[in-house]
Image (tube, helix red, strand yellow):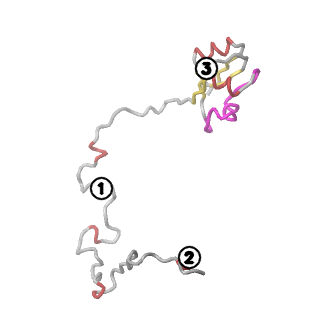
Amino acid sequence: MSEGLITLANLKPFAGSKHREKRVGRGPGSGHGKTSCRGQKGQRARSGGGVPAWFEGGQMPLIRRLPKRGFKNPFRVEYKVVNVGDLARKFSEGATVDVEALKAAGLVKGREVRVKLLGDGEINFAITVKVHAVSKSAREKIEKAGGRVELIEA
């Protein structure tokens, strides 16, 4: 084997790149004895002492100084959106499209989803769609093509 070849067996860190571990509390001769680099007294000298990373020394914390805006509506209903053009691309004539079929086609993701059909795009064949909500334009396009829209009770 040549001397310049590096293998896992002869890997070493560069000279001077590694420091010896600081061993505190090992007597006065070590230079880190007695108080073990913690100073005399105080919060940080105690075991388990210290302050959380977000603590600001008793000053009013930033999160409480900033103004609060708006509110979170606990009754909000969120829908996954599917367009008529998406149905025309993914399904064929006479298909029955429900939430499971939309998941299988990759148009919606998630476990308990509500689906709303919107009218972007065109469709020119009959299809039966079962969704939770539908826009007026989407319903018109589906029915004009000879299809039906059924609403699911959630």
- The tag earlier along the polypeptide, 3 or 1, is 1
Magenta span includes 104: yes
Q: What is the spatial separation of the Cα atoms under label 3 and label 2, in whole angstroms? A: 64 Å
* Picture residue at 61% right of the left edge, 20% below the top: 121
Identify residue for label 1.
55
Where, by quadrant of the figure, is residue 48 drawn? Answer: bottom left
Left/right placement of residue 134 relative to residue 128 reads left
Identify residue for label 2.
5
Expressed as whole percent of the image width and height from the top left, the position of residue 19 reads 38, 77
Looking at the rendering, the stretch of residues picked out in magenta corresponds to 93-112
2 or 1: mark nearer the eye: 2
Left/right placement of residue 135 relative to residue 93 reads left
Left/right placement of residue 59 relative to residue 131 reads left
Rendered view: 70 above or below 129: below
Rendered view: 39 above or below 77: below
Where, by quadrant of the figure, is residue 23 drawn? Answer: bottom left
3 or 2: mark nearer the eye: 2
* Picture residue at 60% right of the left edge, 26% below the top: 82
Where, by quadrant of the figure, is residue 129 drawn? Answer: top right
Expressed as whole percent of the image width and height from the top left, the position of residue 97 reads 70, 26
Helix, strand or loop status at disc 3: loop
Magenta span includes 29: no
Q: What is the spatial separation of the Cα atoms under label 2 and label 1, in whole angstroms? A: 52 Å
3 or 1: mark nearer the eye: 3
Identify residue for label 3.
121
Q: What is the spatial separation of the Cα atoms under label 3 and label 1, in whole angstroms? A: 54 Å
- The tag earlier along the polypeptide, 3 or 2, is 2
